[in-house]
Structures are given as C-alpha cells and as structure tokens.
C-alpha cells in the first residue's frame, strides 16, 4: 500500500507528523517555516504535510508570497481526526510507538516544580462509563486546541484589544481504545483483573515537583 493511501490512525504513526500537528494547532505555517522551526529539511516536512493534508488533518489557511511564487500555510483543526478509523492492532502499535517517542522527547523539557496529572489503566469498565470517558477526552482535546489557536491569534494581533495572553507550555497525550478480552492484566468483561494508576504527581508551581512531561510546539503554539 502506498503512503498516499494510508488508512485511519496509521497516518499519524510518525513522531514528526505528531510534532507538525501540534505546532499547526496554534498557528498556520508553510513548509519552509515549519522546517526551520523543527530543524528539518523543507523537502521532508513538505512530504509529511502532504500526507497529513491528504488524510484531512490539515487545511490550507492562506497563501503567502515567497521569492519566486507563493506558498501555502497549513493549519490543524482540533476536530479533524474524528473521521479516522481505528484500523487493526498493528496500526494501533505503530501509533502508540510514535506517541511514546514524542512523549519521551517532550519529557526532556519538563518544567521542574510543576504538577503532573496522569492516568494509566488496563481493566474492565461499564460501557456507558467508557463512552463518557471518550466524550470527555474529545472535549479536552477541543479545549486545548481552541486555546492554542486563540492564544496564537491574540499574540499575532497586538491591536486586538485582548492584550498578550499569559501562556503556559503544556504537553498532553491521551490514547483511549478498547482491548480484546484476556489482555496482559487478565481483565475481562466480568471485571476481574486489571489495574490503574491515576492522579497528580509533583507540587504546585511554588513547590517541589516530580517527574512529568511538558513542552510547547516550536514557533509558539501550545503543544498537544
């Protein structure tokens, strides 16, 4: 299968593509601008931008003049991934690997002394509760993407009357999916087995902190 025809979530299974989507949530950029921010070649970034646009994850926000012609600037709408399908276990593994790689990279930029909130779980829950959790996860994504877009717009327009917003650089990674029965934890629909870890780690901004991951997309956008 050619890369142009990658289905579902597997189109996201590349750390650079995740970085591009995070960065382009906050501000529109051309391939050349994104390449400079990420320290990549323009050809490499252009390739990944085309794949993401073909998958419906980017929209052309504007055309800007460049030497010798014009260039498109791309933006990532927060709800553009809703149409992607789950694919198979291999697709999920590829995406999980890319997300894990990106999370490790961001963790290197953790701001000491700040609080981390995390949840890690593998167990059986009621279907209605999982449906609610997915709805809340979508709302969380929308909140962060909209905030990144609004903050970038306010920062770019000093005459908007809203003033320069106070920004906090954040990282957020959430990957919810259903498991086949009898996973590693032995969880099953009857509710036996499995476990979870959830809660804040570290302290307030003025206190002692613990391990976390925090970062911001190069170029000013709040990173997802």
Image (cartoon, rainbow, N blue to C red):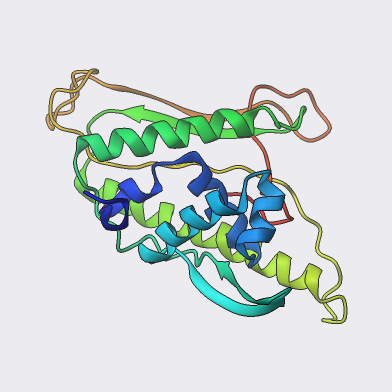
Q: Specify whether 205 is left or right of 148.
A: right
Q: Residue at x 73, y 73 (%)?
A: 67
How many labels, in total? 0
Q: Specify whether 68 is left or right of 117.
A: right
* Quarter location, residue 74: bottom right
Furthest toward the front, the residue is 68
> Compared to 188, does 71 lie above or below?
below
Q: Residue at x 32, y 49 (%)?
A: 9
Q: x, y (%) of residue 206? A: 84, 32
Q: Residue at x 36, y 57 (%)?
A: 135
**Residue 203 or 58: which is nearer the viewer?**
58
> Compared to 134, does 28 lie above or below?
below
**Residue 92 or 58: which is nearer the viewer?**
58
> Compared to 27, does 203 lie above or below?
above
Q: Specify whether 179 is left or right of 47.
A: left
**Residue 75 or 187: which is nearer the viewer?**
75
Q: Specify whether 11 is left or right of 141.
A: left
Q: x, y (%) of residue 50? A: 44, 61
Q: x, y (%) of residue 178? A: 23, 40
* Quarter location, residue 152: bottom right
Q: x, y (%) of residue 121? A: 36, 29
**Residue 175 or 22: which is nearer the viewer?**
22
Q: Residue at x 56, y 47 (%)?
A: 19
């Amino acid at each position: 299968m050619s890369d142009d025809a990658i289905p579902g979530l597997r189109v996201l299974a590349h750390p650079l593509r995740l970085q591009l989507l995070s960065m382009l949530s906050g501000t529109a950029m051309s391939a050349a601008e994104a390449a400079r921010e990420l320290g990549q070649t323009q050809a490499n970034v252009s390739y990944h931008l085309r794949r993401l646009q073909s998958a419906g994850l980017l929209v052309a926000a504007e055309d800007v003049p460049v030497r010798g012609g014009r260039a498109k600037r791309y933006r990532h709408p927060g709800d553009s991934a809703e149409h992607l399908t789950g694919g198979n276990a291999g697709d999920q593994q590829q995406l999980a690997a890319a997300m894990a790689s990106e999370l490790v990279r961001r963790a290197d930029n953790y701001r000491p002394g700040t609080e981390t909130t995390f949840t890690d779980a593998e167990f059986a829950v009621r279907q209605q509760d999982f449906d609610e959790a997915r709805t809340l996860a979508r709302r969380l994504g929308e909140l962060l993407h909209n905030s990144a877009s609004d903050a970038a717009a306010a920062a770019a327009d000093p005459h908007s009357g809203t003033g320069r917003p106070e920004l906090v650089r954040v990282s957020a990674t959430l990957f919810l999916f259903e498991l086949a029965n009898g996973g590693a934890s032995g969880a099953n629909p009857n509710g036996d087995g499995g476990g979870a870890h959830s809660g804040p780690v570290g302290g307030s901004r003025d206190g002692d902190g613990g391990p976390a991951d925090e970062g911001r997309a190069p170029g000013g956008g709040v990173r997802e």
